[in-house]
Amino acid sequence: MIDFSQLDKLIHEKGRLSIMTLLASRIEPWAFQDLKSQLDMSDGNLITHLRTLEKVDFIGGEKLTGDGRPQTLYTLTPTGRRAFIAYLGILEKILDVGK
């Protein structure tokens, strides 16, 4: 039987799952504005989820300043990638049982 308690509650929330999925989908960093656009989230909602994921070292943000408007780029950390892969493994087991 599947141990559903193994589902990472930090990742499992819809907004954070969406962020983790986008960050895992490519190697290049995602700019805050691109994440916001793709996920159709408000600034405050997105920032809250990003901070939660940063606190547990699942993602990292790099603030860039220069001639134009400052922006923050986000990527998965190695810890975040491992956690996401483990999360997907549990989901695959759930799908296999449900088929």
Image (tube, helix red, strand yellow):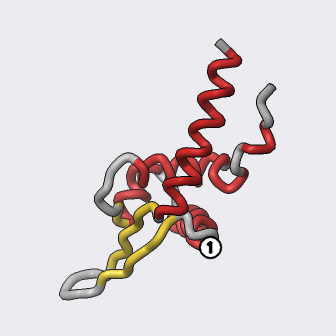
* 95 or 1, nearer to the observer: 1
Screen quadrant of the C terminus: top right
Rendered position, 42 above or below 25: below
- Farthest-out residue, top: 99
Q: Hey, what amino acid is under mark 1?
A: Lys
Give the image quarter of residue 34.
bottom left
Which residue is rendered at x = 31% and y = 81% of the image? 64
Q: In which quadrant is the N terminus drawn?
A: top right
Question: In screen coordinates, is 92 left or right of 63?
Answer: right
The image shows residue 62 at horizontal and vertical percentages of 38, 77
Question: Quadrant of residue 71 in the image?
Answer: bottom left
30 or 68: nearer the viewer: 30
Indicate left or right for 98 with 34 as reference: right
Please give the residue where the numbered disc 1 appears in the rendered image.
55
Q: Please say if 78 is above or below 40.
A: below
Question: Residue 4 appears at what percent x and percent y?
Answer: 78, 37
Residue name at image x 51 percent, y 52 percent: 20
- Residue 39, image x, y percentages: 46, 50
Would you call the spot at circle 1 few (<14 residues within 10 Å), some (14-19), or many (20 or more)?
Answer: few
**Residue at left 42%, top 54%?**
23
Q: Tell me residue 35's x, y (percent).
A: 41, 57
